[in-house]
Amino acid sequence: MRIAWLALLLPSLACAQATNAATSSGAAPDLSGVWSVKGSPATRYLSWGFSKDEPPMTPWAEERFKATKPSFGPRAVEDSNDPVNPTTLSAIGCFPPGLPRLYLQPFPLEIIQVPGRVIMLFEFSHFIRQIFTDGRKHNTDLGPTWMGDSLGHWDGDTLVVDTIGFNDKTWLDRAGHPHSTELHLVERIRRVDRSTLLDDLTIQDPKAYSKPWGGQLTFQLRPTWNITEMVCEDNVNFDQFLKNEANPKK
Amino acid sequence: MTKLLSSVAGLAGLLLVSVSLTAHHGQAGYNTTETVSVSGTVSEFQFVNPHSIVNLNVKDDKGETQAWQGELTSPNHLIRANWTATTLKPGDQVTMTGYRAKSGANSMWITKISVNGEELKMGAGN
């Protein structure tokens, strides 16, 4: 039994040593791999949000929150106006979840590291997030975007990611919490052992929340998985497209 | 079979309720407090995102054929549970158990499914 435990621990120890060695030598730790959010009964809320507690909304956010009709979480309704998952049959859905909500879509992501960049390839509708680690400044020339502009730097074995430049079309989570264009997302991502990645997220948005809040995501390595095609529009919007083609408006 | 018939029984008033042709997202449209089971013949299997769809012809207790629709998670999750696009084929005998649509339509979110007597593993996701 002890040998079995040792066999289980060795890869983790090897990874920890490799990470420490990489950090002390100045090389970036290796976060690469296919990862999926790991839940537990205690973190059931991760199906819809980042925290079991309600965030401290401003009146501006409260008003918008009340207007949201989510498909998931404690306020889930049948006639949802979720821009990603509407359930009213006439609604158009499958808009980008944006960040940080994209993490809560129940699909894996792959992290790929190349010099100067950490790339996140999300299975959900194949969104790509580029986190530039080459020391550049934020570039928001494109204007507010669904995914924002992400910069990263290493703090020891932790990748610190700073993201701004969001539009305000997305919800922060699947429970309908709003945000403004002032959203500033800070993440601290580290690989604590070979199979586990932690991401501590801090959400700052003074227009929508009276103080910073957030949560922690635990990711599990999926060494046998590949990121596969996942097109949100497939059997909802495409069916409607075919119906419109068959009965064009005059 | 008795259980199946009891689940289907009493649906005469719902004969005119068409099966939802557009997949729901999430389970808010389903009554998750109880499950129903139906058995029948596969008429179509859509292995598509974001949710796969099983269309089934089910004989009710009067011998009339009712169209049922079952919703599953995405193909991505299903292939990781060893499904393929041809795991279900027209003509296969399927029993599906799950949460029925709150609207009363003959549709469900599948929680358990077997084909030709063999239970299939379910993928993650919603």
Image (tube, rainbow, N blue to C red):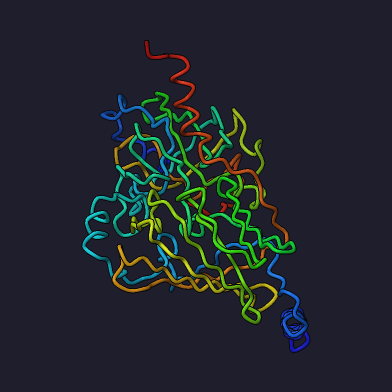
Q: Residue at x 32, y 67 (%)?
A: A206
- Residue A245 in picture, x, y percent from top left: 47, 17
Front one among A116 and A34: A116
Give the quarter of the figure containing the C terminus of chain A.
Answer: top left
**In which quadrant of the rendered view does residue A130 lie?**
bottom right
User: Residue A77 at x, y = what percent?
Assistant: 29, 49
Residue at horizontal 43%, vertical 73%?
A: A42
* Residue at image coords 52%, 70%: A187
**A179 or A105: which is nearer to us?**
A179
Please tell me in which quadrant of the rendered image residue A229 appears.
Answer: top right
A150 shown above or below A160: above
Q: Residue at x 44, y 20 (%)?
A: A243
Please, is residue A111 above or below residue B69 in the view?
A: below
Q: Residue furthest bottom?
A: A2
Q: Is residue A223 above or below residue B77?
A: below
User: How many numbered circles does the render carry?
Assistant: 0
- In screen coordinates, is A87 left or right of B53? left
Expressed as whole percent of the image width and height from the top left, the position of residue A83 reads 39, 44
Query: In the figure, is residue A155 to the left or right of A23?
Result: left
**Image quadrant for the N terminus of chain A?**
bottom right
Q: Nearer the viewer, residue A57 or B65?
A: A57
Residue found at the very far top of the displayed protein: A250
Residue B88 x %, y % = 61, 36
